[in-house]
Image: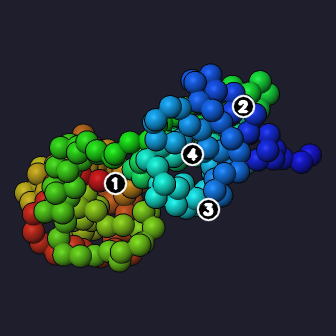
Amino acid sequence: MAGPRETELYPPVKAFLEGQGYVVKAEVGGADVVACRGDEDPVIVELKTGFSLALVHQGIARQTVTDWVYLAVPRPAGAGARKGMQANVALCRRLGLGLLTVRLQDGHVEPLVDPGPYAPRKSAVRRGRLLREFARREGDPNTGGAHRAKIVTAYRQDALRCAAQLSAGPARGAEVAAATGVTRATRIMADDHYGWFERVARGVYALTPAGAAGLAQWGVPPAGSTDGTD
């Protein structure tokens, strides 16, 4: 079954803009859609059958003509597609582009974001989390661009310290904490985030085969600050 064509997007977009008092014409000056209303700046809409980098490039090029540039694509179907569209909305907002989706079944047009200057809100929580992780991680054990599953975090470094201590045999959480300096050793071993630890008695933990393998893979991190979070 053939997919939608760009020309199918034009009638709904034209009707949407005309409903707001614009005079709309197609293929003017290389733009797919141009809408004018009185003495206001023109509105340009670029049509595509799917969101793409090429569409974003077109929109950015049109911003040399007017600040009111929209991208228009068919409304996505399915949870995965809608999640991807959320990322596209964030990208358009960052670039000052508007984004319209068109429901081809009935021609409904939905503006997801309007053109405008990007003013990001900083997250103090995320900033604090990043700086704490940076301060607590010992050395630079990772390579930039590595897959997330292979990253050594401060939390993993503390878990490795606990694993190294248990390699000599089962021990109580308080004993591991005192020997390693990892004050949250008992919590780390009880949570067993990596499958490295098992409780063999009340308050006593032992190293699992997975823990021994992890210790062999990652090694013991250098001594330093502890209690990072993953």
Whether pointer 1 and pointer 3 mark residues with C-beta atoms closer than 8 Å, the reply is no
Q: Looking at the image, is mark 4 or mark 2 nearer the viewer?
A: 4
Residue at 89% x, 48% y: name it.
2
Say which amino acid is labelled 4.
Ile
Say which amino acid is labelled 2.
Pro
User: How much space separates mark 4 and mark 2, taking CA atoms?
Assistant: 15 Å
Label of residue 44 in the image: 4
User: How much space separates mark 4 and mark 3, taking CA atoms?
Assistant: 16 Å
Label of residue 187 in the image: none
User: How much space separates mark 2 and mark 3, taking CA atoms?
Assistant: 22 Å
Crowding around mark 1 (Cα neighbors within 10 Å: few <14, some 14 to 19, many 20+) is: many
Q: Quadrant of residue 153?
A: bottom left
Please state the horizontal and vertical placement of residue 138, each as a whole percent of the image. 17, 70
Whether pointer 2 and pointer 3 mark residues with C-beta atoms closer than 8 Å, the reply is no
Report whether 50 appears left or right of 163.
Answer: right
Q: Looking at the image, is mark 4 or mark 3 nearer the viewer?
A: 4
The residue beneath circle 3 is 54
The residue beneath circle 2 is 12
Q: Looking at the image, is mark 2 or mark 1 nearer the viewer?
A: 2
115 lies above or below 153:
above
Mark nearer the N terminus (2 vs 1): 2
Crowding around mark 2 (Cα neighbors within 10 Å: few <14, some 14 to 19, many 20+) is: some
User: How much space separates mark 2 and mark 1, taking CA atoms?
Assistant: 60 Å
Say which amino acid is labelled 3.
Ala
Near-viewer residue (142 or 25): 25
Please state the horizontal and vertical placement of residue 135, each as a whole percent of the image. 13, 63
User: Tag 3's secondary structure?
Assistant: helix
Near-viewer residue (127 or 161): 127
Mark nearer the N terminus (4 vs 3): 4
Label of residue 197 in the image: 1
